[in-house]
Amino acid sequence: MRVLGIETSCDETGVAVYDTTAGGSAGLRAHAVYSQIALHAEYGGVVPELASRDHVRKLLSLVRQTLAEAGLTTADLDGVAYTAGPGLVGALLVGAGTARALAWALDVPAIGVHHMEGHLLAPLIEDDPPEPPFVALLVSGGHTQLVAVDAIGRYRMLGETLDDAAGEAFDKTAKLMGLPYPGGPQLAALAEQGTPGAYRFARPMTDRPGLDFSFSGLKTQVLLAWQQSDQSPQTRADIARGFEDAVVDTLAIKCERALDAAGSDTPACNTLVVAGGVGANKRLRARLQAMCVQRGGRACFPRPALCTDNGAMIAFAGALRLQAGQHDDAQVKVVARWDMAALPPVAAGMVE
Ligand code: ATP
Ligand code: MG
Ligand code: FE
């Protein structure tokens, strides 16, 4: 089954074709992402109306480009998947409207995909994919969640952030030290030149039981340290390193706890799946992999390009559900907020 995936929940236009007959990474026939970062940079954040308009401008040409790269035409498509939420409603409507129109014209089924389920399943696009049950850490610009994945489509929320998401904390911290939007990846790059231990920040909420996170206080600690410093380039790198270490440490401590908790009533759970933009962070990847290997398990990540928003994860997640016989009716419906635990399970063993 060949499924076109369309992602327009925020400031990336993503399109991909996933072919379930090939499976794994070979199933990803083509994917392309157009980022609106330059458009929003001068405002220091995403401007929803500009985002919607830019999706309108870019989406169809990206669909054509992706199909051409895959060596396919629209007639080769068996289904269309689009992000139906959570996200910016105007931006979501562009993808949903386009996807529904295409599906209608081609007379193929279409399905609205949960953006965070897309992120969560992205590591399964890679070869040697993990099988549930496993624990997933979702670390993106808008979410920080620990999820018990009992089966594909059966998600239990173990913990989440009470304030800023990890990616948001990276971006805001970068901004207060004068780095341009979105500063997360730049802050991480800067941290490479920082001296480990020169600055030490708190590991929020690790001193008490529980799997929730809180990152907003960390940002304030960085602000004070930065204001009281000489603000030299080396100091900025040192603070960046201190901040990154604090976030990575905090995430690793909670992931280990989540694996322990998940394994308490079932055989030991040592598989961690990590997804979302912050999952591209090198130090986080190394740290979580080391932690899992030490437990005799493994950590599974998508390649960095599939950590941040992309159409591949939507094509893949949509394909799994379409294959299981699920689809949505013809109305163009999107949701700004959507609880992942409310999703229907994906029945196993359906036809290819
Ligand atoms: P959500 O998925 O919650 O709606 P989003 O789609 O905006 O949010 P993603 O595209 O998954 O989020 O990820 C973007 C975030 O990832 C940004 O906050 C960005 O700073 C962060 N990020 C990307 N690369 C890195 C990196 N190497 N280190 C740290 N953070 C990073
Ligand atoms: Mg983005
Ligand atoms: Fe995202």
Image: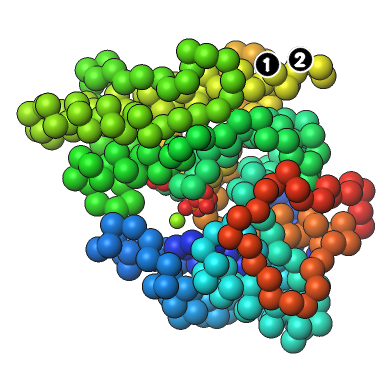
Point out the image quarter for the N terminus: bottom right
For the residues labelled 2 and 1, the Cα–Cα distance comes to 6 Å
Instruction: Inspect the image, locate mark 2, and give the three-letter code of the amino acid beneath it.
Output: Ser
Pick the quarter of the image with the C terminus: bottom right
Q: Tell me the quarter of the picture where residue 230 sits.
A: top left
Instruction: Look at the numbered discs 2 and 1 and tell me whether their residues touch, using CB distance below 8 Å.
Output: yes
Disc 2 element = loop
Q: Which residue is mark 1?
A: 260
Q: Nearer the viewer, residue 15 or 199?
A: 199
Place of residue 80 in the rendered image (x, y in percent of width and height, measured from the top left): 72, 70
Residue 47 visible? The answer is: yes
Q: Residues within 10 Å of mark 1 (few under 14, many from 20)?
A: some
- Kind of residue sitting beneath label 1: Asp
Task: Check mark 2 vs ligand 1: CB closer than 8 Å? yes or no.
Answer: no
Left or right: 47 in relation to 94: left
Mark 2 = which residue?
264
